C-alpha cells in the first residue's frame, strides 16, 4: 500500500503536522524525507529497508551513496534528499558555536567538532581560529583524506591562521573507524603544528579527535 491510500489521520506527514515530529518513529521520519516509494510500494516500506540495511537510523544515514544504491527504489533523487537532510543537520549543530562565541573548555570545542565531523566516512581536519579572548573568528576544514588518514601541512595551517589574524587555535579531526585513541601520527602532527604556530605567536590550545563514540583531547592528555 502507498501512504496516499492510508487514512489521513494515520499518514506520517499529517501526524507530524498535527502533533510534531517527536511522536514519529525513525521509519516514519525517513518516509517523510523520502517522499514516496518505488512503484507499487510505500515510502514507509522503503524507509524500513533503509533501516534494516544500516542497522539503525545513524547507520542508515551514515552509509555512503554507493552502499545505499543496493536498496531497490533508492535512486538518485531520494539519495540526494537523504544526503541534504544529513548535511543540514550537521551544519545546524555545527553552527551552535557562532562567530564570537567563547570556547573556554575542551568540551565546548569537542561538541562542535563532533557535530561537524563524527559521522563522516573519511577523515577531515578542521580548525577553529580564535581571538585573544578565545572567541571564535572562523571555522575551516583544511584537509580531507581517506579512512586511512589525512595529510596535514603545518605551513597551510599557519597561513590560514595569519589570514584570520588568529591569536589561538583549536584543531580537530575525526576517526571514521570509531576508535578515538590518538595514533603516533596524531601526536607527531600536533607537536609540529604547535611549534610552527609558536613561531608566529599563535597558541595551539588543543587537538581533538572525535568519532561517533566520543572524543579525546590531546591537551587533557598533557600532550600539548
Image (spheres, grey):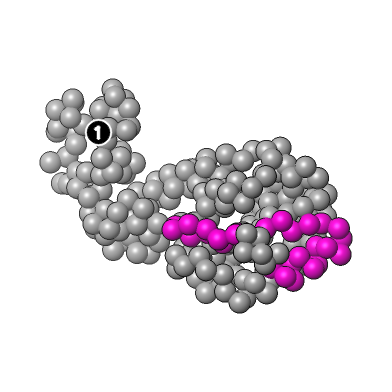
The percent coordinates of residue 207 (x first, y second) are 65, 61
Indicate the secondary structure of the residue bearing disc 1.
helix
Q: Residues within 10 Å of mark 1 (few under 14, many from 20)?
A: many
**Chain part drawn in magenta:** 190-218
* Rendering coords of residue 220 (x, y %): 62, 59
Left or right, 70 with respect to 145, comes to left
Q: Residue at x 52, y 42 (%)?
A: 93
Residue in view at x 30 percent, y 29 percent: 16
| Quarter assignment of residue 15 | top left
Residue 65, by quadrant, is bottom left
Is 125 in the magenta? no
> Depth check: 69 or 22 in front?
22
Which residue carries the number 1 mark?
12
Front residue (pair 38, 126): 126
Looking at this rendering, what residue extends furthest in the right direction?
Answer: 200
Q: Looking at the image, which residue sits at the far top?
A: 18
Amino acid at each position: 500500500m502507498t501512504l496516499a491510500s492510508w487514512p489521513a489521520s494515520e499518514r506520517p506527514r499529517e501526524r507530524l503536522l498535527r502533533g510534531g515530529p517527536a511522536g514519529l518513529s525513525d521509519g516514519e521520519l525517513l518516509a517523510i524525507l523520502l517522499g514516496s516509494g518505488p512503484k507499487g510500494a510505500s515510502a514507509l516500506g522503503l524507509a524500513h529497508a533503509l533501516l534494516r540495511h544500516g542497522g539503525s537510523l545513524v547507520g542508515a544515514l551514515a552509509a555512503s551513496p554507493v552502499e545505499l544504491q543496493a536498496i531497490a527504489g533508492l535512486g538518485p533523487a531520494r539519495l540526494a534528499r537523504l544526503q541534504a537532510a544529513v548535511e543540514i543537520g550537521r551544519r545546524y549543530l555545527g553552527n551552535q558555536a557562532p562567530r564570537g562565541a567563547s570556547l573556554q573548555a575542551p568540551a565546548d570545542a569537542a561538541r562542535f567538532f563532533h557535530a561537524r565531523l563524527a559521522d563522516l566516512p573519511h577523515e577531515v581536519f578542521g580548525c577553529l581560529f580564535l581571538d585573544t579572548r578565545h572567541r571564535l573568528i572562523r571555522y575551516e576544514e583544511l584537509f580531507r583524506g581517506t579512512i586511512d588518514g589525512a595529510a596535514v601541512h603545518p605551513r597551510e595551517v599557519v597561513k590560514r591562521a595569519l589570514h584570520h589574524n588568529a591569536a589561538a587555535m583549536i584543531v580537530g579531526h575525526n576517526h571514521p573507524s570509531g576508535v578515538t585513541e590518538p595514533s603516533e601520527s596524531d601526536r607527531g602532527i600536533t607537536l609540529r603544528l604547535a611549534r610552527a604556530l609558536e613561531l608566529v605567536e599563535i597558541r595551539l590550545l588543543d587537538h581533538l579527535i572525535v568519532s561517533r563514540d566520543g572524543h579525546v583531547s590531546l591537551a587533557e592528555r598533557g600532550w600539548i
